[in-house]
């Protein structure tokens, strides 16, 4: 390790935002020190999107802002400074070909998050990397002068905190950044999970554990309110604790504050058929299997694992012959197929969330520069600020855009 202790800028955190900020500063001719506890930079980035890395979303700035339930208005400046299209051009120029998939989600053509991480590592290659945790900020008279680690003090004109949130703590995002921000006098909004699986009431979901529904309708309602909180179409997974999968992770961003029994997920098992067409389908199925017992007649309609539970919920005795199923019983079955409901008890732990909701209060950060309004020379970027978005590449766009904005102004 070099004995150098003085730099123009210190960047704390070697994730998506930190690497973007460090590379941007280097492009501007600054000397940069990058602090990261992990032996591999961009560790969390390498596992995002199940290892595929949804880099951004090929949408307009206004749409990206609308995809952020918290902090959208604050992020307008950052998204305008470095748009989703800028993000795409940036990685293409770094030698990573991209592709656009359903929902305008952008991925590397290789389907490898490693390629995205390595491109950012190359971009920030001129920074001197110190693999040691920052224990405190060095502050004097309302200004940051550097950081302290177990090996001593490093001085600089500016410090960028890009420490991540509190999700996936094994990758280094263990909330250290919140402690440093608090030391500087910043208010930290309590971290909560977002884009996280849901814990369900009862034993129905554990009975269906491992079952994946690829094309189902998902609607979430709140007790005492008629208007749905959220609606989507796509993939869902039953687990030993409840529900997961893309539609559920997206829904979770809308379920705040979470309380047991407050929300119910309604699953449409046959979204392509309205009630009239589904009723006609049921009539055909019951006629085709008129001499079978009801419990053995649904193989062409449902996955095998789901049939016993649907039969139970319909209230139709399983041993009933299909030709004996009455019109009211058929309507009860139709109701279950169009509204397979699951009451939600809560979120899975923050450590299992894709992103953290909460963080450094946006009221204390200048949205034009990402500089602290409380401490001169202190900047923030990425997941540690109190802003989060839905799935679809928007959370990484927050990291890249705020990292770029902070890097251009530090």
Image (tube, rainbow, N blue to C red):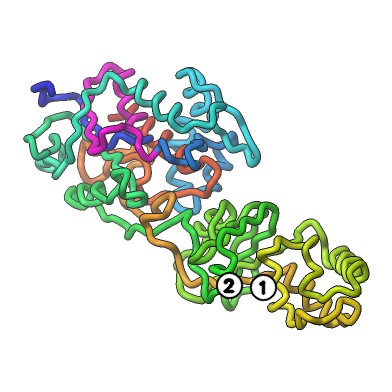
Looking at the image, tell me whether mark 2 or mark 1 is earlier in sequence order.
2
Whether tag 2 and tag 1 are in contact, CB under 8 A, the answer is yes
Gap between marks 2 and 1, in whole Å? Answer: 8 Å
404 and 284: which is toward the camera: 284
Segment tinted magenta in the rendering: 19-44
Left or right: 67 in relation to 294: left
Residue that appears at 30% across and 39% down: 162
Q: Is residue 12 visible?
A: no
- Pointer 2: what residue? 204
Q: Is residue 350 visible?
A: yes
Q: Secondary structure at mark 2?
A: helix
Q: Quadrant of the C terminus?
A: top left
Residue 232's spot in the image, x, y percent?
65, 55
Q: Quadrant of residue 247?
A: bottom right
- Pointer 1: what residue? 309
212 and 126: which is toward the camera: 212
């Amino acid at each position: 390790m070099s004995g150098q202790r003085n730099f123009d800028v210190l960047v704390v955190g070697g994730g998506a935002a930190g690497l973007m900020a460090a590379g941007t500063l280097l492009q501007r001719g600054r000397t940069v020190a990058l602090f990261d506890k992990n032996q591999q930079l961009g560790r969390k980035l390498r596992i995002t999107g199940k290892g595929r890395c949804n880099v951004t979303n090929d949408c307009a700035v206004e749409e990206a802002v609308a995809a952020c339930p918290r902090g959208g208005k604050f992020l307008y400046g950052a998204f305008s400074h470095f748009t989703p299209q800028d993000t795409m051009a940036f990685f293409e120029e770094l030698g990573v070909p991209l592709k656009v998939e359903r929902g305008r989600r952008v991925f590397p053509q290789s389907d490898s998050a490693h390629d995205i991480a390595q491109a950012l590592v190359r971009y920030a290659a001129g920074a001197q990397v110190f693999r040691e945790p920052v224990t405190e900020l060095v502050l004097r008279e309302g200004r940051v002068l550097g950081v302290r680690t177990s090996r001593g003090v490093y001085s600089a004109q500016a410090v960028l905190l890009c420490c991540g949130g509190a999700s996936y703590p094994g990758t280094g995002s263990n909330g250290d950044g919140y402690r440093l921000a608090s030391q500087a006098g910043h208010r930290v909004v309590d971290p909560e999970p977002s884009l996280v699986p849901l814990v369900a009431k009862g034993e129905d979901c554990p009975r269906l554990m491992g079952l994946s529904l690829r094309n189902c309708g998902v609607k979430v309602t709140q007790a005492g309110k008629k208007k749905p909180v959220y609606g989507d179409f796509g993939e869902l997974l039953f687990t030993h604790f409840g529900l997961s999968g893309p539609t559920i992770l997206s829904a979770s961003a809308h379920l705040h504050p979470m309380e047991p029994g407050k929300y119910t997920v309604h699953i449409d098992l046959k979204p392509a058929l309205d009630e009239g067409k589904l009723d006609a389908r049921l009539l055909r199925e019951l006629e085709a299997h008129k001499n079978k017992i009801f419990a053995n007649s649904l193989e062409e309609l449902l996955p095998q694992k789901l049939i016993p539970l649907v039969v139970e919920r319909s209230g139709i005795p399983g041993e009933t012959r299909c030709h004996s199923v009455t019109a009211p019983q058929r309507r009860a079955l139709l109701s279950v197929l169009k509204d397979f409901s699951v009451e939600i008890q809560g979120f899975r732990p923050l450590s299992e969330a894709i992103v953290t909701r909460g963080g450094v209060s946006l009221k204390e950060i200048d949205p034009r520069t990402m500089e602290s309004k409380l401490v001169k020379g202190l900047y923030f970027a990425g997941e540690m600020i109190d802003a989060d978005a839905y799935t679809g590449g928007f959370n990484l766009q927050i990291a890249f855009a705020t990292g770029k904005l902070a890097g251009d102004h530090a």
